[in-house]
Image (cartoon, coloured by chain):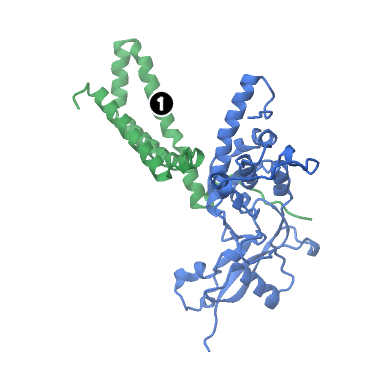
Chain colours: A green, B blue
Amino acid sequence: MSYKPELTGRWWLKHGHFKRYMLREATVIPLVFLLCSLLAGVFSLQDVERFSQWQAYMAHPLVIIGHTVALGAALYHAATFFVLFPRVMPIRIANYTLPARLMVAGQWAAVLAVALLCLWLVTGGRV
Amino acid sequence: MTQPRTCYVDISRYDPERGDQYPTMQRVQVPYDDSTSVLDVLQYVKEQVDSSLSYRWSCRMAICGSCGVMVNGIPKLGCKDFVRDYVAHKGVGRDHAANDAPALTIEPLAHFTGERDLVVNMDEFLTHLEAVKPYIIDPASRPNNPSAATHSQTPAQLARYQQFANCINCGLCYAACPQFGLNPEFVGPAAIALAHRYNLDSRDHGKHERMQVLNTHDGVWSCTFVGFCSDVCPKGVDPAAAVNQGKVESAKSMLIQLFKGSSIGDSRS
């Protein structure tokens, strides 16, 4: 005789660690919203009227809030991913292992570089 | 002489020979001081309160990996976890028995089949461990080859796998892993960490045999990097890192087979 404990669908409510994990996984939801908005933008390029409608949609306060949440979600996911990266792919050069802190800093530096490049492209090189 | 401080502890009790269908909680009052471990609490209960209490233990120094239990819902080694850390927030020196809320709840390791009280059946874990062949495989050094050279290894070669060699098979990572809780067929953190440990060993030639297990859905790919296994590991093994490094190895192994046209898991990379 023995008993097998069942894991219910609410297992992730047991600890803060599991809740943070689920939050990390849930960041995909606002990002899907952002992706749909961008896809709609691509399809709206077919004619001028559709494009102006899409511009109006993008300027709606609720959409701006949604996209701001998506930015926050992307940054949170990046922060968790960047910390995990050195554990998954440690970089060894001869007998030297690159410190995890350096790898995390390098990834954030890359984010900053890409963000600045995008800003430069969007502003037409005025920044 | 000052009176010893005391606190209440809830302990999960289950005795199928008594007809129990499910575990129940038994509340006991136990004395403690700054050096009292959870294992000391269990030993006090067995010797002074109820001799029928069943639990596993051996070395009392976090080497044997026998005394794993859930303490307040977190997998812990009983010998390495101290009562003082659970009552400290209430103020040192106060008699916590005045408030009969339990400071600790001690339960058997989660996700395993309960056998009796705090004793669980570890067969699932041991089956997974056996499947990954956690030992050095080197056909050239078998006893029928007395002329084989002795194994030598440089400190740099040792450093590649040493962290993963610290596993004591306590099973805490399995109790922490929701993927194992949902799917017991998942090979799991400790077995994969040990497979990875031998795959990284310069003396080993058995990687292709282990990859057959790791490449499957129930191998490395069932892991979603919850990461709690590494948090609870009492030896700092970081099994989550091993599992996810195993995913990189598995992806490489699958790619090689794609080009070779051989069956999955048969890579001799």
Q: How many marks?
A: 1
In the rendered structure, the answer to whether residue B208 lies left or right of residue B176 reads right
Say which amino acid is labelled 1: Leu
Give the percent coordinates (x, y) of residue A66: 36, 33
Residue at the outermost front position: B147
**For residue A120, which quarter of the picture?**
top left
Q: Is residue A11 visible?
A: no
> Residue extending furthest bottom?
B1
Q: Name, please, the residue furthest toward the top.
A: A47
Identity of the residue furthest to the left in this view: A126
Locate residue B216, reporting x and y percent. 66, 33
Chain letter, disc 1 residue: A
Closest to the observer: A97 or B230?
Answer: A97
- Depth order, front residue of B253/A8: B253
Tell me if B144 is positioned left or right of B199 in this view: right
- The residue that appears at 51% across and 67% down in the rendered structure is B86
> How many residues crowd mark 1 within 10 Å: few (<14), some (14–19), many (20+)?
some
- Residue B124's place in the image compared with B247, above or below, is below
Instruction: Report whether residue A36 is seen.
Output: yes
Task: Give the x, y percent position of residue A107.
Answer: 38, 36
* Identity of the residue drawn at 61% across and 29% down: B253
Front position in the image: B111 or A55: B111
On the image, numbered disc 1 is attached to which residue? A35
Quadrant of the image for the C terminus of chain B?
Answer: top right
Q: Secondary structure at mark 1?
A: helix
**Image location of residue B66, percent across then percent down:** 67, 60
